[in-house]
Amino acid sequence: MENRETVLVTGGTGFVGMQIILQLLQKGHKVRTTVRNIKSKDRLIKTLKSNGVTQFDSLSFVETELTRDDNWDEAMKGCKYVLSVASPVFFDVPKDEEAAVRPAVEGILRILKFAKKSGAKRVVMTSNFGAVGFSQTDKTRMTTEADWTDINLKGLSVYEKSKTLAEKAA
């Protein structure tokens, strides 16, 4: 990426999103990030400050969600690169598994739709080893992107299932 290009990082308040934003700012990029609630930007700024970031003129925020079209045009505007990091995380077993998985699948499709509409040059989606790594048990060969995890695998978490289905949808 050329310096000073605007990069959109979805899910900027998550652990991975924060690390990506930190590195992009340190390398001189302009960064826009999505947050579900604009109030959560204070936590991100505090984390960035504790990691040595002192200037925030290259960082902007857009409040939006994976489950709605609201503000995605604004989030994508002028961004050549989109790093899709946002994904629902579950700390408890959800009562309705399908409803819990839907935001991950619909979210990545929404991100791709708006990235295409805005003319983004590249979209990078973060994944999870669970999307390809759990069903391939042959230890004599390397696991590759062709080894999709069976979403009906016993013991598979809702998060791993959502990441598998979202990546397949993308």
Image: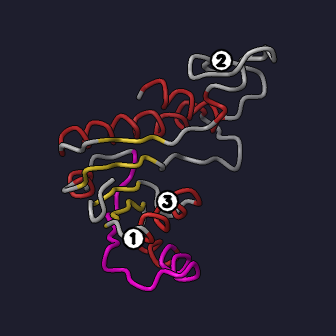
Identify the element where label 1 is drawn.
helix
Identify the element where label 3 is drawn.
helix
Pointer 1 residue: 38
Check if mark 2's residue and mark 1's residue have beta carbons within 8 Å. no
Q: Quadrant of residue 121?
A: top left
Pointer 2 residue: 150
Q: Amino acid at mark 2?
A: Asp
- Camera-nearest residue between 127 and 90: 127
Q: Considering only order in the chain, which callout, 3 or 2, is on the residue closer to the N terminus?
A: 3
| Magenta region | 44-66
- Camera-nearest residue between 141 and 59: 141
In which quadrant is the C terminus drawn?
A: top left
Q: In the rendered view, does 13 fall on the left or right side of 69?
A: right
Rendering coords of residue 49 (x, y %) = 52, 82
Q: Residues within 10 Å of mark 3 (few under 14, many from 20)?
A: some
Q: Which numbered disc covers residue 20? A: 3
Q: In the rendered view, does 78 fall on the left or right side of 39?
A: left
Q: Considering only order in the chain, which callout, 1 or 3, is on the residue closer to the N terminus?
A: 3
Q: Amino acid at mark 1?
A: Ile
Q: Tell me which residue sits at (34%, 68%) in the image.
A: 61
Q: Nearer the viewer, mark 3 or mark 1?
A: 3
- The Cα atoms of the two marked residues, 2 and 3, are separated by 30 Å
- The Cα atoms of the two marked residues, 3 and 1, are separated by 19 Å
- The Cα atoms of the two marked residues, 2 and 1, are separated by 37 Å
Rendering coords of residue 91 (x, y %) = 69, 50
Membership of 76 in magenta stretch: no
Q: Nearer the viewer, mark 2 or mark 1?
A: 2
